[in-house]
Amino acid sequence: MSEFNTERKPASEATEVRQAAKLRKISRAGREDFLLAERGRIAPGSPRQILGRFGHAVWDLDSYAFLDDPAFEQNPPTTVNPSLWRQGRLNNIAGLFEVAPTIFQVRGMDISNVTFIAGDTGWIVIDPLTAEETARAALALVDEQLGARSVHAVIYTHSHTDHFGGIHGLLSDEDLESGRVELIAPAGFLEAAISENVLAGTAMLRRAMYMYGAFLPHDAQGHVDTGLGKGLPALPTVGLVAPTLEIEATGTELTIDGVRMVFQITPGTEAPAEMNIFFPDQRALCMAENCTSNQHNVYTLRGAQVRDALLWSKYIDESIVLYGDDTDILFASHHWPRWGHEQIEHFLSSQRDAYRYVHDQTLRLANQGFTMNEIAEQLELPDGLGDEFFNYGYYGTVSHNAKAVYQRYLGWFDGNPAHLWPHPPVEAARRYVEFMGGSAAVLEKAARYFNEGDYRWVVEVVNHVVFAEPGNESARLLQADALEQLGYQSESGPWRDFYLTGALELRANGTALKGVRGNALGPGLVRSMTVDLLVDLLGVRLNGPRAERLELDVNLVISDRDGDLWTFGTRHGVIHARHGVRSTSALVEIESTIESFSAFASGSKSLEELLGTDGFRATGELALLAQFVESLDVFDFGFEIVLP
């Protein structure tokens, strides 16, 4: 085993053996995916580095140049799974591409793609990326290479931030206020886009930092690729503008600027609100994020509601039935397109079957009495599905997707009463370490397993020592070394980033974010917030035990939303709210703009700060209102994950 120190380590002998086996498996693959990813490139990604509002690099393509080093083309560094290295090289192919004579994509300048459809006089844009900065750079590249045109419509295919957040990079406030630009989205888009990022937003954002390797260096021992794309933009400027038109039903057809579009609504698949788009005149099908060149997440490791793998499979089949015979070009909001009817039908049917296989086989085994972890350990895609690179576990994996299917139907409990009421991690860890003969004995045995290459077992047992004795440096550093080797071995980009970020924080003895307070409700989302959701956020922040005896009713008027009237308050440590009601027993009256009430609900400004502004006026029993505010938790981004 390597020495106990905080330095990053090379690949161990056991890791090198695993990498060599994977390299032998994938070395038989041809260059078909590289030819697809390079096809139609008009210009490389430019600029390579896109700066943000703090003068920092929101996006830096050059930081991934190590993947294209010719020295590693045949034999990747042993610190990276060769299959993930291959996917990372594919995702490095960036720039402006012609998909069809009137369809263009900018790829590799954000984690997602932005698509430009040429109409009679302007552009129809599909999915304006994550960040205002990257979207603006993509539009500049298109203008430079294809000539400047106005944007006539923007389509959000679904409710994830990397498909709407860059809207202000494409459209000015004047464009948006004029009403001349149609903003099109699937039904339920706005609620889904906001709610997923708010109520559990702090926890999800912290976990996303692990999932996307936000603090890892970009190199062969750090972050390489997410599998879905290079990575997330750093400290992006994110916006959200409400759609002007929501698509309610499959088969809805629109013609905008001479471009015919037919929509397929697919809620509950990759996102709660999602839709595919067929362009009959171009014989082109946009599969949004429902079919990309990797196995996707049925459950995303950053945390979110489990998706419906069965429904996902059925919607892909519906796409084949509705549009398959008339499709010659398929593109999506990640990765590269596919051309040719037979190739497209094979791709769609194979991804359809992969999600269905994981769903059905998980439940088959569950009905035989196997538990979630037992199912995940034995389930693999059959050769006809598993040998397709576009079904590889670069992002989602069979392992954690099988657990997601189990969770969706059966929940966290496996039926064994021994697991019904376990001790919490620290208390359990202390007892485990005592039973195993103390920390010194555990570490001695764990070191032997480390030298044998059983890193999974090392991280399981040493985790108990870390949680029982967080000051035990030897335990932390051994745990970090084992997590690092698991990261090197991982084919999944998110698995790699989770393991390596865990190692990073163990070596640093904690997160650099400790004490950084806030929430995921950035200013770009505020204008689209609903009062109902903001009151729900207050309920999540309300410390029930602290507010147990507090009784308060507040009348609220949102001044910049036509005097929208609410009553909210608390009893028994619970938030209550009603719309359109003025309480006669209210002891406090608030008149506020939506922006100021958002600051109040999220805790981004104190009550004292708000009371000194024109956007927030409160009258009545302000001491009670202050008591209510004091009972609200302000969340800390820097909660520990690999330490107690």
Image (cartoon, grey):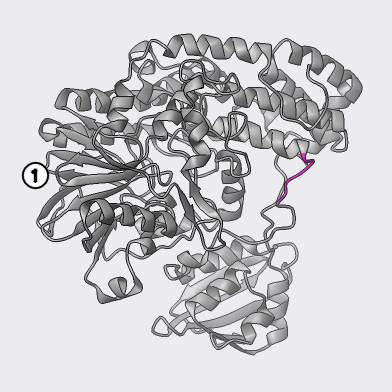
The answer to which image quadrant residue 415 occupies is top right
Local packing at callout 1 (Cα closer than 10 Å; few below 14, some 14-19, many 20+) is: few
Disc 1 residue type (three-letter): Asp
Residue 504 position (above or below residue 244): above
Residue at (46%, 85%) from the top-left corner? 559
Report the span colored magenta: 508-512
* Left or right of 276 on screen, residue 95: right
The answer to which image quadrant residue 426 occupies is top right
* Residue 563 percent location from the top left of the image: 42, 85
* Left or right of 43 on screen, residue 227: right
Residue at (79%, 33%) from the top-left corner? 6
The answer to which image quadrant residue 258 occupies is bottom left
Q: Is residue 388 visible?
A: yes
* Residue 14 percent location from the top left of the image: 66, 11
Residue at (29%, 26%) from the top-left corner? 35
Q: Is 495 in the magenta?
A: no
* Left or right of 188 on screen, residue 250: left
Residue 111 position (above or below residue 225): below
The residue under label 1 is 281
* Residue 355 percent location from the top left of the image: 37, 27
